[in-house]
Amino acid sequence: MLTDEKIRELIEKLGITDDEFAELVEKTSDEKNVTPGGAMLLLHYRVFNKPKGVETTIDNFTKPVKEAMDDLFKDASEFLSRYALNNHKDEADWLEKELDREMKFSKNYTPEKATMLLAYSYGWRNGDAISAFDSKLVQGKRADCLSLDSLLPKINEKGKIPFLSGIVNRISNAKEFDEQKGHKLRSTGIEITDGKNKIWINCHDTSPFKSKSTGRQVLGKFLSTKAQMNRTEMIGSIVTFMNLDARITKKSDLRLSTGPYSNFNYEKPDEKSPLGENA
Amino acid sequence: MKAVPNVFEPGPSSRENGGIGEEEFLVYCLKAGIDIQLSLGPYSNCDFKVSGKRVDVKTISNDFGPLPDFNVNVPSCQVSLEQDLFAFVFHDKTKETYTIAGAVGREDLLRKGILKRKGESERNGKFIYKCDTYVLKVGELLPIEAFA
């Protein structure tokens, strides 16, 4: 069940000899009434089980212990090499240029972290691209590419993305603001994906107000409530957002949110079971 | 790339219970000869892969173990396309035992589960949902073997 490499990794992590490991496997196997192979899997689980409550956030790149960081860096480098080979085989220096740009963009990051960030933006998730969808299904339903280098050119001079489509991966709980933020009353996050990249869109309920420039009354928009009302149906649907606000934060993250002039609609894929095996 | 918003952080004991529940699930699958793999990456949003299906194991503590009429639940913000199955393990606090109650596919959870809204209550107000939650009866779960 475990590869030789994983077994070696486990023995090293436990800091025991091969004989001691064999004894431990036998003991675990007897104790839990599983095969020796199963016992090794169980030991691997116990030793390497991810800490509970670890969120899938990019900030966690700073948290893993050194060995885990080394593994992640190796994974990310291999992923990028494969990606470059598959998608940019005619541009020999593509990866080098991208890494240079990432280093320049991320300033204080180490080359290892910059590599992992770059890999992340191309869909790397601990060595595996996210395979939530059948790519044919995604293409047929016009999901946009959601990698950072595809999103940034979509932002117009007004700081808006006029149209953006993706597949709904998950919907957060509604967050009520303690104090009203401008016209914003509450928000719900909708995480969309193209099957490889993911990004959250903050959808807001906004109150009606009078436009300073035109003097006209602008109606309230209730996109947070709309997401909450339709959350079960929306998971797995293709959603199209109109007029999204886009901004780059001080931490160089891209934040997308809806405002009083935004909207979204969604449609279920035609397949009998959009959330089934292909999802 | 933001973290999934979490309404209430699990306490240390819940995390420990969750860890034991997952281990019991793993042992159960190993004993049953089910094809199970670990999914331990820090960015993984599932615990195991059973016959290639991504499984999120949920552990519920009570004083009885599972009964068909009991509810199992999944916070709605945790239901995403990154899990194919949700498996439920009951921790009987009295007997200190763990029982695998069964599993449900994500599609069935969304279709059959009742979406309870934050603030809704049950048992004459004794239990209040802290966040939007999909709720299903234990009797509606299938044995994990059905997905293997």
Image (cartoon, rainbow, N blue to C red):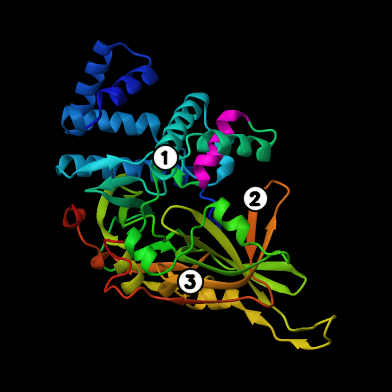
Which residue extends farthest front? A90
Going by the numbered disc 3, the residue's amino acid type is Val
Query: Magenta region: which residues?
Result: A110-121
Of the numbered discs 1 and 3, the one sitting upstream in the chain is: 1
Tag 2, which chain?
A
- Are labels 3 and 2 assigned to the same chain? yes
Rounded to the nearest whole Å, what is the CA distance between mark 1 and mark 3? Answer: 33 Å
Q: Mark 2 points at which residue?
A: A253
**For this rendering, which residue is in front, A138 or A228?**
A138
Going by the numbered disc 2, the residue's amino acid type is Asp
Q: Mark 3 points at which residue?
A: A239
Of the numbered discs 2 and 1, the one sitting upstream in the chain is: 1
A113 part of magenta stretch: yes
Number of other residues with Cα within 10 Å of mark 3, as a class: few under 14, some 14 to 19, many 20 or more? many
Tag 1, which chain?
A
Q: Mark 1 points at which residue?
A: A89
Residue A279 appears left or right of A168: left
